[in-house]
Amino acid sequence: MLKIEHLSYETPRKKILDNIQFQIEAGEILGIIGPNGAGKSTLLKLLSSEIALQTGSVYWQNQHIDSIAIEEIAQSRAVHRQHSSTSHNFSVYEMVMMGRYPHFRKSPRPIDEFIVEQELMSGGIAELAEKPFKNLSGGEQQRVTLSRAFSQLREEEHNQERKLLILDEPLNHLDLKHVYELVERIKSFVKKGHIAIVVLHDIQIAATISDKILALKNGKACAFGTPRQVLTASFMKNCFEVNATINHHQNNWHISIDHH
Amino acid sequence: MIGVIHISISDLSNYFMHKINLSDQHSYVLESIRFPRTLGAILVGALLSLSGLVLQAAMKNDLAEPSLLGVSTGASFSTSIAIVLVPTLSIPFLYNGSPIVFAFVGSLFTVIILSRLSTIGYKTDVSQLILTGVAINALAGAGTGLMNFLSDDEQLRTISFWMMGSLSGMSVFKLSVLSFTLVCCFLFFQINFKKLNLLTLGENEAQSLGMNVELFKKKIIILVSLAVGTTVAFCGVIGFVGLVVPHVSRILLGNDHKKNIPATVLLGSLLLLVADIISRVIVLPAELPIGIVTAMIGAPFFIHLLRRNQKRLQAC
């Protein structure tokens, strides 16, 4: 369970987040949406301990996130950022293996090698394993860093603890086939009782994959709930300042913007 | 063996097997000059190469190298202060130990400035890093020039000889300090090879993957400063080794620091050993500054490897 209480963040010039509160249960996907400059990235940075908490608290499995050691939390929380690079041209296999670093001391165990090979296959990059990372296309690099995040959180038989996957715009650079595959990968990940938090610009995909949606605007939570509760025409007008027509049948969403 | 005074290989092997006693002159040359110097070359080459490898990972930059970034120049400036100004204080204890302490403080100070000024947000900015290195090199160079100006004849000779970079004058004390530093650095970095790999991804990624970045960077700063400080205090500025050797190692063995740390130590030792032998024999009976030799060996080889690497990457 992930619980956020009274989370605020400000710089000397601007209040970036203002009193954000929500709770995500095991097995749920939280989609975070909002216009540019809404505070989505800052919220992710706080959740991933990239910047220190100022006001408010973040609890992961009923423990304050600051009280968990960096080495320990890396075994149950993975962060995938929009831009990932390396100064050294590691191979694809080595890049994905880094996801297992929090789990072994000196050398990878057979289970780590097995998991990396599985994730390379799941990401459709097994044939690229020996290629240098920097020589790949943007979409291929994205699949490598996503596979690294999934390999970091892959559970082992004796260890069934809950995991938290944080993804910032994970669909960037991906073609349609790989977008679909990634969505399925995230869904099967949370089915095991884990939690995924995904920042998305594509509201239709956010509606399709999310169990809960958090909408941010000007640093405030303007809506939180299931996609059906949140995504209405009036919400689209208030949050994104567009007139939209929203249709959904079961879990198939169609959102079109009215230009008049 | 090689040098102004010729000692044949058969004499040398017999000497090692305790079959013959060499003349006093030959024994002195071997035991007091050539063995310490050979061991010094091995240790200094290993330390400089390892420092370059670690700086390149920590700064996330292929160009990072102690002399290029001004770390060696910073250490040499503070060593020249130790040679010129400290004796005026008339404290014998401070005078004896001051070059190494000053060199360590100088390199520590430089690495901290580099680390602070080249970081924008959570990233190391390449141009900022290089420009900071240029500024430190200029400032420390000017400071060393000032010390030259203030020095008397004897001090000037000491500074000039030391600044050219030389492995001569290795004593048991110097070899002990260099050995201790190398063992500390090698063990620490070999144990923490995963952290060096992670640093190449950037600080945020490294932290997400379980690394306490701030703590590790502080340890790097202290150990690299110790490594560069001791080599500069004892041998002056020997450039290029820290830049070339890690690249050669990476091209030969890939990017994983688990393999690169021992490989860099071995290759660095080898390069400086060969460079030292060449520097002693190429202009007999004189001796060429070793920095010239390392550049003459290293630069063409480096260009060759870069060309080969370029072709390999284009073919992928």
Image (tube, coloured by chain):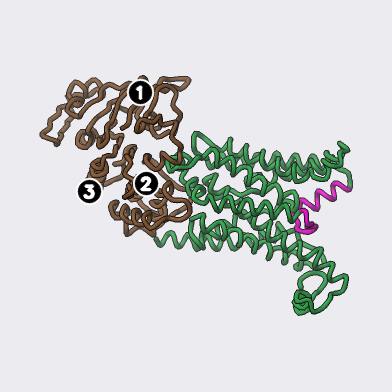
In depth, the one of B195 and B146 nearer the eye is B195
- The structure residue drawn at horizontal position 39% and vertical position 43%, both measured from the top left corner, is A75
Q: Residues within 10 Å of mark 2 (few under 14, many from 20)?
A: many
In depth, the one of A181 and B280 nearer the eye is A181
Q: Quadrant of residue A202?
A: top left
Work out whether mark 1 precedes mark 2 in sequence or the reverse, and give the earlier one: 1
Q: Colour of chain A?
A: brown
Task: Say which residue label 2 marks.
Answer: A152
On screen, residue A188 versus residue B224, left or right, reads left
Work out whether mark 3 precedes mark 1 in sequence or the reverse, and give the earlier one: 1
- Mark 1 lies on a secondary structure that is strand
Label 2 marks a residue whose chain is A
The magenta segment is B154-173
Tell me if residue A259 is in the magenta stretch: no
- Give the amino acid type for the residue marked by disc 3 in the picture: Lys
Numbered badge on residue A177: 3
Task: Say which residue label 1 marks.
Answer: A5
Q: Is residue A5 above or below residue B105?
A: above
Q: Residues within 10 Å of mark 3 (few under 14, many from 20)?
A: few
Observer-side mark, 2 or 3, equals 2
Question: Judging from the image, what is the letter of the chain drawn in green?
Answer: B
